[in-house]
Image (spheres, rainbow, N blue to C red):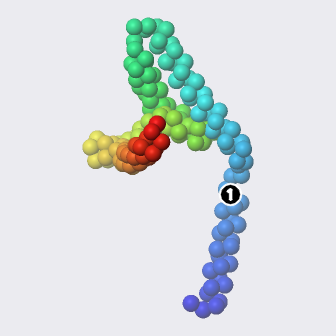
Amino acid sequence: MTEQQTKEINARNERYNKYVESVTPKTGTFVSLLKAFVIGGITCVIAELIGDGLSTLLPSLSDELVSSYTSMIIVSVAIFFTGFGFYDVIARHGGAGSFLPITGFANAMSSAALEYKSEGLILGTSVKMFTVVGPVVVNGIVWSTFAGIVRYLVMLIFGV
């Protein structure tokens, strides 16, 4: 490559970087963190209210069942919100706060299923939906195994 070509490539890259910088929205880190905290917190408070409501309305339910029903309800609501486009609005404002709770996982699965539904039930919806699940399951297994080994070693060393 000649020196002239290198200069042209560098000039093109500089123009592109300036363009990207001009169209990229400016967000403050503190504001983004605050929004994520608020949205994630609201999600968790709503889940707690649902759980408390279930405990009050159905006092015979065990704590485990209340937790399971609460999770099922908030996952169902997240899927419903995804289907009607509400979750995108929440995610746009809440950032990571909308993706960290279990609702973010439900959104990821349902949006993948909706995106590929035109390809059919099996090869579209099912396959694409579970491409999201695969990495989550693998990471869950790997990191929980690692955490178990670390816990076992700590128990051996410190006798805790």
**Image location of residue 157, percent across then percent down:** 45, 45
State the residue at coordinates (62%, 85%).
6
The tally of labels here is: 1
Q: Residue furthest left?
A: 122
Quarter containing the N terminus: bottom right
User: To which residue does mark 1 refer?
Assistant: 23
**Image location of residue 89, percent across then percent down:** 58, 37
**Can you tell which quarter of the image residue 93 is in?**
top right
10 Å crowding of disc 1: few (<14), some (14-19), many (20+) = few
- Residue 85 lies, with reference to residue 70, above or below; the image says below
State the residue at coordinates (70%, 66%).
18
State the residue at coordinates (49%, 38%).
104
Q: In this rendering, does residue 15 appear at all?
A: yes
**Amino acid type, label 1:** Val
**Image location of residue 110, percent across then percent down:** 41, 38
Whether residue 49 sits left or right of residue 26 in the image: it is left
**Can you tell which quarter of the image residue 114 is in?**
top left
Q: In this rendering, does residue 82 appear at all?
A: no
Q: Viewer-proximal residue, 147 or 130?
A: 147
